Amino acid sequence: MKGFDFLKQAQGMQDRLKGVQEEFSNLEVTGESGAGLVQITINGKHECTNIHIDQDVTEGSREVLEDLVASAFNNAVHKLEKAQKDKMSKMATTFGLPLDSIFSNER
């Protein structure tokens, strides 16, 4: 009977993990640079879903615009990684898992 209970718990954990993966895919974050002059929105799959570039930036140099776009994208990626880490930490707490040690070696 104990083995059956363990399998039932494992199945429940697997179902919750699938739900978290779906939540990750549905996340959307917006990164910005140049005090909001360039904004890039990405989803949980790291796909760009929207770009906003203030008209004032388009009148400047191409190199500045390129730097602002790259910076906004990187900002969005960092925000997404943090949001995913926070969700994983909450889930780990629910399951009683020590995931903090997994995240301790981050850059």
Image (cartoon, rainbow, N blue to C red):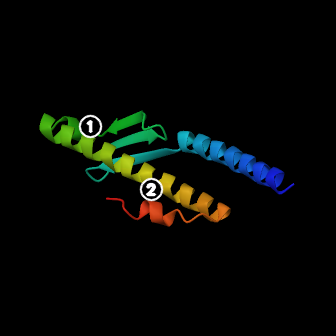
Q: Quadrant of residue 65?
A: top left
Say which residue appears at 43% left-offset and 51% top-offset: 81
Residue 3 on image: x %, y %: 80, 53
Q: Is residue 37 visible?
A: no
**Residue highlighted by disc 2:** 82
Where is the C terminus found, in terms of image quarters? Answer: bottom left
In the current view of this chain or complex, which residue is farthest to the right?
1
- Residue type at tag 2: Lys
Does 105 appear above or below 15? below
Residue 102 on image: x %, y %: 46, 60
Q: Quadrant of residue 18?
A: top right
Is residue 25 shown left or right of residue 79? Answer: right
Q: Nearer the viewer, mark 1 or mark 2?
A: 2
| Distance in Å between CA atoms under marks 1 and 2 | 30 Å
Is residue 96 shown left or right of residue 82? Answer: right
Residue 103 on image: x %, y %: 43, 61
Where is the N terminus found, in terms of image quarters? Answer: bottom right
1 or 2: tag closer to the N-terminus: 1
Does dot 2 land on a helix, a strand or a loop? Answer: helix
Say which residue appears at 62% left-offset and 58% top-offset: 91
Viewer-nearest residue: 92 or 22: 92
- Residue type at tag 1: Gln
**Residue highlighted by disc 1:** 55
